[in-house]
Amino acid sequence: MMGVMSEPKWYVVHTQTGVEARVKASLETRAETAGLKHLIHQVLIPTEKVSEVKEGKKRISERKFFPGYILIQMDLTDDSWYLVRNTPGISGFVGSGKNPIPLTEHDVDQIVRQQEEKTSKPKPKVEFTVGESVRVKEGSFANFNGTIDEINPNRGKLRVLVNIFGRSTPVELEYWQVEKI
């Protein structure tokens, strides 16, 4: 006779920032070694793709949107709890005391949807806003200050109003050519 298995739930655990991937690999290996792989269904590090245009080349990189946290879909038993708690790099479950609180289905859906959206549409690494003051660091107008007039994220370009000889002059620049003041 088989026991009734409940639906696995998602839990959030704290890790040290920057070691999330190592902790994920370690947890998966330890679950296999301990024969508990059937209790740990999925380990997720929510990431987003970010794009930056540098010297005319668009680069896409990945960035974690919850640094220091990983999500684990698991059946919570004493064994699985102990395995997770004793994995090097994990400092504990998010929740209170010994009983971790699972994420709601809604929270999980939102995180997964957010990850899918952010993977298909990379967002600019540096975000600027119209009206923001910037200093030009590269090109013909290096060391001039200006105000952002228009932003074109798809091309990684900005139109900056630079004050030249007392006149406001629009200059098109790439993101990497300016810095926030």
Image: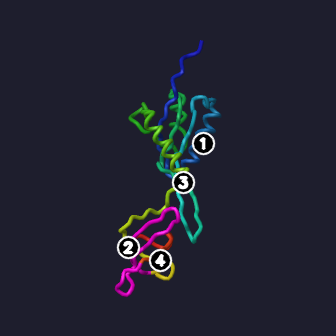
What secondary structure is the stretch in magenta mostly built from? strand
Residue 147 - label:
2
Tell me if residue 181 can be seen. Answer: no
State the separation of the CA atoms marked 2 and 1: 48 Å
Residue 49 - label:
3
User: Closer to us: mark 3 or mark 1?
Assistant: 3
Residue under numbered circle 4: 137
User: Closer to us: mark 4 or mark 1?
Assistant: 4
State the separation of the CA atoms marked 3 and 4: 26 Å
Q: Earlier in the sequence, mark 2 or mark 1?
A: 1
Q: In this view, which residue lies farthest toward the bottom?
A: 165
Say which amino acid is labelled 1. Answer: Ser
Query: Above or below — where is 91 with respect to 135?
Result: above
The secondary structure type at the circle numbered 4 is loop
State the separation of the CA atoms marked 3 and 1: 24 Å
State the separation of the CA atoms marked 4 and 1: 43 Å
- Magenta span covers which residues? 143-169
Residue 45 - label:
none
